[in-house]
Amino acid sequence: MSACTSAIPVGAPGGPTGATAAGGSPSVPLTQPALRWPVRTVEHIDLWLHAFALISEDTARVRLYRNGYRDSLVVVKNQRNVLTSLDANRATLAKRLPGAGGYLQAQFLPFEFSNWDAMKYALERFLQFEGDPRRAPDRETQARVALIASMFPASADREWLRLFLAGVIDEQERFFNAEHSRLVRTRASVITSVDSLWQQVYRTKFERFLNNTSQRQGDLLLSLPIGGEGRTAAGPNRQTMVAVPFPARSEDAVQVLYVLAHEVTGSLVGTVVTDNTTPAEQRAGAADRYVSMGQVQSGAMLLAIIAPELRDGYVRFYLAQAGIRATAAEANSTFDRTFALPLAIRDALQRQIDIILSGI
């Protein structure tokens, strides 16, 4: 669903018929340029992330999922007397997550597919072929099976996925489809507010950075389960897709821009951290912590240059994501302590952002 309306095309019901009103001569067909970075919602991406949110313990400094998301859904389901197999098997599914790293890469899988039917088909074929791409009947299915096998390589992983997928299917049919449609419908004004803020005010401010980081085309996805960590992946047409929180109120539309800044700078951070940490730090896990902190800091650095009026709100938002309160006078110093980085990494990130924004 896009918040943006498009002109009725020539020949469509209610639109021009292809002849001018005066003189009757044929009109030139109207073409509308593709909207850059449209605001959308995508149900199957939300469904998959929703399912992970229900079985995960989210203890990250910046939450992977919206604060209180699982608890709020438990209340709704209890009120409607809904218990799906995902709920019934939650403890079993959650038990394996810590040893499997939360199957973090698998959370990006739905971005590869245009809809739930295509994704479900690929997952079912993967399980049918026991993760062996050579058993697939065509190249496309082979590629899909190989991709899923990279995320679920062992027999135990496949059994976990089999149980998880059954739960997701039940969740979609008995609860999520209707609930997602209801929430998107009731938040139509929020979508309009986000779209206006983005397309009419801030997209041009982000444009140089997006262009110079090969993110000229993309989709801005409002996602119900997503928290401040966001998700970024290549879509089925290889465009950049950035999933950001879906605010409940129009007044909070600006939060979308905070998480967008955090996400579009994220690709810089890994290389900078690798270049400025020792092998020992990388083995000890320090580099991973710096990547997480660096993504938060890099978003603030970007906004300080392209939209300085947003930086203070960004700082307060990410402090709130970390569960930290600070006065206005203390916010910046608290932010730097909470998301602390070695000076070498911080300076390198700032230089990289400056270089990108100074490019043509």
Image: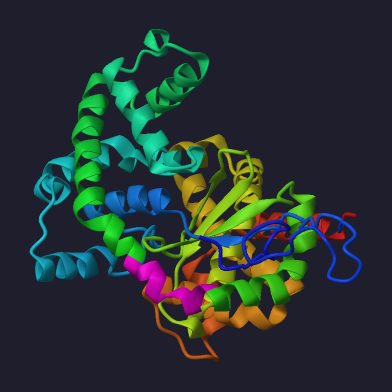
Residues drawn in magenta = 182-191
Give the color scheme: rainbow, by chain, secondary structure or one colour.
rainbow
Residue at 35%, 69% (x, y): give it.
Answer: 183
Quarter in which the C terminus is drawn:
bottom right
**263 relative to 112, above or below:** below
Residue at 87%, 56% (x, y): give it.
Answer: 26
User: Going by the picture, which residue comes out furthest to the top?
Assistant: 134
Q: Seen in the image, is 359 located left or right of residue 134? A: right
Q: Seen in the image, is 84 located left or right of residue 321? A: left
**137 relative to 253, above or below:** above
Question: Where, by quadrant of the figure, is residue 199 drawn?
Answer: bottom right
Determine if residue 178 is in view. Answer: yes
Determine if residue 352 is in view. Answer: no
Residue at 31%, 15% (x, y): give it.
Answer: 129
Between 36 and 269, the one lying in front of the other is 36
From the top left corner, tell me how far across and down residue 224 is, in percent.
39, 63
Report the magenta stretch's main SS: helix
Between 102 and 135, the one lying in front of the other is 135
Between 269 and 143, the one lying in front of the other is 143
Q: Is residue 128 magenta?
A: no
Q: Seen in the image, is 37 located left or right of residue 246? A: right
From the top left corner, tell me how far across and down residue 24 is, in percent.
87, 63
Q: Seen in the image, is 200 located left or right of residue 235? A: right
User: Going by the picture, which residue comes out furthest to the front?
Assistant: 23
From the top left corner, tell me how far across and down residue 293 is, in percent.
52, 59
**200 relative to 90, above or below:** below
From the top left corner, tell me how far across and down residue 312 is, in percent.
60, 82
Question: Where, by quadrant of the figure, is residue 260 drawn?
Answer: bottom right
